[in-house]
Every structure is written in structure tokens, then in C-alpha cells.
């Protein structure tokens, strides 16, 4: 059967032969369509739609926060939970993807997850209070958490080894465009219709995606096996992930040395230790930690940690730099970033195809070095860069389009087919946690470096008495020539000096942060060279 016969080998036996020798459960419609020559392409475009919807929702909500707070009378703490609880829902469900796929199969796990996501989106749009919105967002996160790992497992099943990079490239289009279109689309819907429209927009896309999944995908249940749910493993892992996400997301607000944040990290450490003990010595572990004995998967996971940390940090810094420091509107910033986004999307399928023919590590190194160059470019900009300079820096950032398809292909291709869903779920969890850590680190470093540079500049200006006197005389003369007299002059003088120092120290703090992120991308490029087996891409 086209789509499954030319799949990866399992313990020396091609998957096609393995599947022929096992009983299957198919629907009649799915069987006939699965034999179509273009079956794998229909499946890929179908799950790409789900990926787009999932990725879109990661950024579309943020821009509507002020109007949500006003509409449902939510305070700052409650609105933070609206954002955090979505990630918690994703983190809770991801470890169970392998177990669920064993029970109901990949088709119905993907379809059910997308249906749950769509239904919960409608409920979020109808939320009448902060608590109802928080609850519905948790359900939405549960639906979203299974989409990405299940989709990656499906791609590895329907594509032969020599075409998996192309399949991953096409799939990557969805979660490349989604996060970038989110703020622009969210701002437009919020301003012209209502904040509720940012959730309702998911309904038609989700319904189409569910319909296509039911009609197109073959319901292959041949891999079903009896396995009990490792409840203790699920509870301990969920506790670890939830406490880490809470600590990373609220550390800046509560204070990193506060008892609350330190308690969260302490609970996380205990939960992680218990989880490792349960999984290593349990009879039916939720997560097979032996996956990390595979050196290719282990190093690819490390590269994914670098990627998540650096990319999420850069995703925070770039819009902040454009909107907070350079004072672009959200729409103007989105338009500036659009050329780079389009190129990133265009690169993904091309690089996926090329990585099937050439050593995929080459594309990883190139992509990470381009992303590093973009960060260093931002660091070397002056206080008032020209728009053309910004656009070129954002275009170079499109090098990340070289990273995703080959990284996923390399990381998962050496695993057995029944390990793909669990392995892809682990990859997503580690990248998500690393991404949250990157966001937290970028926020902390920007704030601290801004304070440090402002303090240093103030002390330097105070010590250079003659220069300070001349600056005050010049500013005082300018203020008096504009009509300010008497006691207003010194007040405005010190305000002007403080604003000048604030802006100068802020731009230097941004430069330091971009340099830090740039070196992280360089580290990811070096780690990519250590992934074993990059030259042989046709195993």
C-alpha cells in the first residue's frame, strides 16, 4: 500500500512486510483512498492544517489581553493564568501520546485532539468569567498537546526514509506561519469585531481539518497493544512540568528569590527525581527513558533545547525591540517581519527535500549560523536603525527555516515505528520547557542589564563634572528658548537627562541580549555537528 509500504524498517523487517503480516482495522473509504498515489501528500497537507491552527493559537491570544480583561473583569493574576494554563494542558497530555496511540491509533488520536481543540475554542469564545475562560483554555491545551507529536508520527509512517525531510518541510509550513500571523490577525479581529473572534476563527478551520482527517487518513490500528497507563509516572511528570512552567512564567513577577518560586523549583526537583525512579524501575513506564540511549535522538534533543531556548528568547526580544524601543505599532512590526516569515515558510519544504538528498547536518549548521547572524546584526544596530537594515536582519532570521525539517528528520529516523509518538512528544515537551526558560531568561537579562547600564551611565555622568555642567547648561538654554522659565527648568532638565540615559541604557541592554542569543545559536550549530549518522540519510 502506498504510504505505508515504503516506511522505515523495524528490527530488520520493512514496515510494509510487518504490516502485511499483522491484522488491520480499516474503514472501506480509508482503504481505497490510502491506495491512491497521492495519499501521503493529502495526509501531509491535512495535518499541516492542524499544525497551523495549533501554532496560530500560541500567539493570537496575547494581543487581545487588555480587552479580555475589561470584558470579563479579569485581574492581572487571572489573565496570566489564561496564558499559563494552556501550556499546562499541553504539558499534561504530551506524555500520554504514546499510550493513547496504542489504544485508539494515530488517525483517531489526531482527529479527536483537533476536534477537542475546536470545541474548546468555541467554549473559550463563549466564556462569561475569568474562571470559565481559564478552564476552557486548559481543555484547549489538552487538545493542542497531542496534535504535534501525533502529526510527526504520522509523517514518519506515510513517507519512505528518502522523502521524510520533504514531508517534515511541508508540515513545518503550518507552525511557521501560524505564530507570525497570530498577532496581526488577532489585532485585526479584536479591533474590528471582538476578542471572542480570536477563538471563533478556529472553528471553521478546525471543522475542515477534522473532516479532512476523517475522510483522508487510513485508520491503521495494527499497532494496538495492551498496556496499562502509568498513572504514577503521569502524575509525577505532570507535577514536574507544571511547577517548572509556573516558576518560569511567574519568576519575574513574584521575584526569583521569593519563597513561592523557590518552593515551586523544590517541588519540581522532587517530582523529577520520583518520576525518574518510577520510569526506570516501573513495569510499564509512561516514558521509555531508554530512548536516550540512542545517541542520535539524545543529541538531537540537546539541539532542540538550544533551539527552543534561543528561538523563544529571540521571539520575545525582536517584537519588544521594534515596538517598545523603536515605537512601531504591532501592525507595522508585523509588516516588517513579513518578508522573513514568507522566506522561512518557503525554505521549509525546499530544505526538507534537499536534506533528503544531502547531509541534513549541513542545513542545521547553516540555519543556526544565519539565526546567529541575525541576532548579532540586531546587536550592532545603532540607536536609530533604518528600516532597510531592520528588514535585512529579519530576512536573515529566516535561516531558522533551514532548521526544523532536518532536525526532526534526524532526531526520529533511527527509532522504531512504535517509539515515534512517544519520542516526538518528549521532543515537544523539552523544547517547550526550554522555550519558557528562554523567555524568562530574556526578560530577566533585559531588565537587569538595563538597570546596570543605567546605573553605570548615571555614575559616569556624575563623576565627569565638567561634562555634566556643560550638558546641563546646554539643555537649560534649550528649555529657556522654548519658553520654560524659573523652577520648571531644572525639573525638565533632569527629566530630559534621565530619559536620555534610560534610552541609551535600554538599547545597550538589547544589544547584550541579542549577543547572548546569538552565541546560543552558535552553540546549537556546534551541537548539530555532533549528531551521529548525518551523512547516511537513507537507512
Image (cartoon, grey):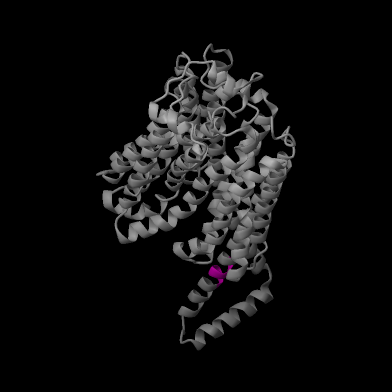
Residue 233 placement (x, y as % from top left) = 49, 20
Residue 201: say if magenta: no
Residue located at (49% from left, 67% from top): 327
Residue 340 placement (x, y as % from top left) = 57, 58
Residue 498: say if magenta: yes
Is residue 16 found left or right of 51 in the rendered image? right
Residue located at (38% from left, 34% from top): 214
Residue 305 seen anywhere in this rendered image of the structure: no
Residue span colored magenta:
497-501
Which SS type dominates the magenta stretch?
helix
Residue 301 placement (x, y as % from top left) = 63, 34
Q: Answer with the quarter of the image where residue 297 lies.
A: top right
284 or 468: nearer the viewer = 284
Residue located at (43% from left, 58% from top): 184
Residue 350 placement (x, y as % from top left) = 62, 49
Is residue 527 found left or right of 394 in the rendered image? right
Residue located at (67% from left, 65% from top): 460
Q: Answer with the quarter of the image where residue 142 lies.
A: top left
Residue 277 seen anywhere in this rendered image of the structure: yes
Is residue 151 found left or right of 302 in the rendered image? left
As drawn, 71 above or below 279: below
Amino acid at each position: 500500500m502506498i504510504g505505508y509500504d515504503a516506511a522505515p524498517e523495524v528490527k530488520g523487517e520493512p514496515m510494509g512486510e510487518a504490516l502485511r503480516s499483522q491484522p488491520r482495522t480499516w474503514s472501506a473509504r480509508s482503504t481505497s483512498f490510502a491506495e491512491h498515489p497521492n495519499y501521503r501528500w493529502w495526509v501531509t497537507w491535512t495535518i499541516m492544517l492542524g499544525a497551523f491552527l495549533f501554532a496560530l493559537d500560541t500567539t493570537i491570544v496575547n494581543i487581545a489581553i487588555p480587552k479580555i480583561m475589561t470584558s470579563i473583569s479579569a485581574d492581572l493574576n487571572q489573565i496570566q493564568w489564561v496564558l499559563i494554563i494552556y501550556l499546562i494542558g499541553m504539558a499534561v497530555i504530551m506524555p500520554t501520546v504514546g499510550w493513547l496511540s496504542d489504544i485508539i491509533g494515530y488517525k483517531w488520536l489526531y482527529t479527536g485532539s483537533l476536534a477537542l481543540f475546536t470545541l474548546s475554542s468555541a467554549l473559550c469564545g463563549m466564556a462569561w468569567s475569568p474562571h470559565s475562560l481559564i478552564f476552557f483554555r486548559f481543555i484547549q491545551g489538552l487538545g493542542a498537546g497531542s496534535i504535534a507529536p501525533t502529526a510527526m508520527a504520522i509523517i514518519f509512517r506515510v513517507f519512505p526514509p528518502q522523502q521524510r525531510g520533504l514531508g517534515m518541510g511541508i508540515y513545518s509550513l503550518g507552525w511557521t506561519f501560524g505564530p507570525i500571523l497570530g498577532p496581526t490577525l488577532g489585532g485585526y479581529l479584536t479591533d474590528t469585531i471582538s476578542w471572542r473572534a480570536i477563538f471563533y476563527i478556529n472553528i471553521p478551520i478546525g471543522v475542515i481539518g477534522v473532516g479532512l482527517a476523517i475522510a483522508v487518513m487510513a485508520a491503521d490500528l495494527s499497532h494496538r497493544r495492551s498496556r496499562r497507563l502509568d498513572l504514577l509516572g503521569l502524575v509525577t511528570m505532570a507535577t514536574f512540568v507544571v511547577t517548572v512552567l509556573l516558576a518560569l512564567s511567574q519568576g519575574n513577577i513574584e521575584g526569583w528569590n521569593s519563597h513561592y518560586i523557590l518552593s515551586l523549583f523544590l517541588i519540581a526537583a522532587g517530582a523529577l527525581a520520583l518520576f525518574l525512579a518510577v520510569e526506570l524501575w516501573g513495569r510499564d513506564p509512561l516514558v521509555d527513558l531508554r530512548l536516550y540511549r540512542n545517541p542520535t535522538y539524545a543529541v538531537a534533543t540537546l539541539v532542540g533545547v538550544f533551539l527552543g531556548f534561543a528561538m523563544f528568547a529571540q521571539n520575545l526580544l525582536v517584537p519588544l525591540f521594534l515596538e517598545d524601543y523603536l515605537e512601531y505599532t504591532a501592525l507595522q512590526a508585523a509588516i516588517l517581519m513579513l518578508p522573513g516569515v514568507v522566506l522561512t515558510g518557503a525554505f521549509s519544504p525546499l530544505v526538507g527535500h534537499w536534506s533528503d538528498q544531502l547531509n541534513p547536518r549541513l542545513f542545521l549548521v547553516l540555519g543556526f549560523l544565519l539565526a546567529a547572524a541575525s541576532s548579532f546584526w540586531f546587536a550592532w544596530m545603532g540607536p536609530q536603525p533604518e528600516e532597510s537594515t531592520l528588514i535585512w536582519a529579519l530576512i536573515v532570521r529566516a535561516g531558522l527555516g533551514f532548521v526544523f525539517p532536518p532536525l526532526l528528520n534526524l532526531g526520529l529516523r533511527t527509532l522504531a515505528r512504535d517509539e515515534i509518538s512517544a519520542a516526538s512528544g518528549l521532543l515537544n515537551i523539552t523544547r517547550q520547557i526550554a522555550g519558557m526558560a528562554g523567555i524568562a531568561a530574556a526578560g530577566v537579562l533585559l531588565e537587569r542589564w538595563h538597570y546596570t547600564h543605567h546605573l553605570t551611565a548615571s555614575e559616569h555622568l556624575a563623576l565627569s563634572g565638567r561634562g555634566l555642567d556643560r550638558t546641563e547648561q546646554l539643555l537649560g538654554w534649550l528649555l529657556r528658548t522654548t519658553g520654560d522659565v524659573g523652577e520648571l527648568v531644572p525639573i525638565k532638565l533632569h527629566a530630559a537627562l534621565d530619559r536620555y540615559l534610560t534610552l541609551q541604557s535600554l538599547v545597550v541592554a538589547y544589544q547584550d541580549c541579542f549577543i547572548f542569543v546569538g552565541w546560543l545559536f552558535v552553540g546549537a550549530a556546534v551541537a548539530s555537528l555532533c549528531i551521529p549518522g548525518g551523512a547516511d540519510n537513507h537507512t
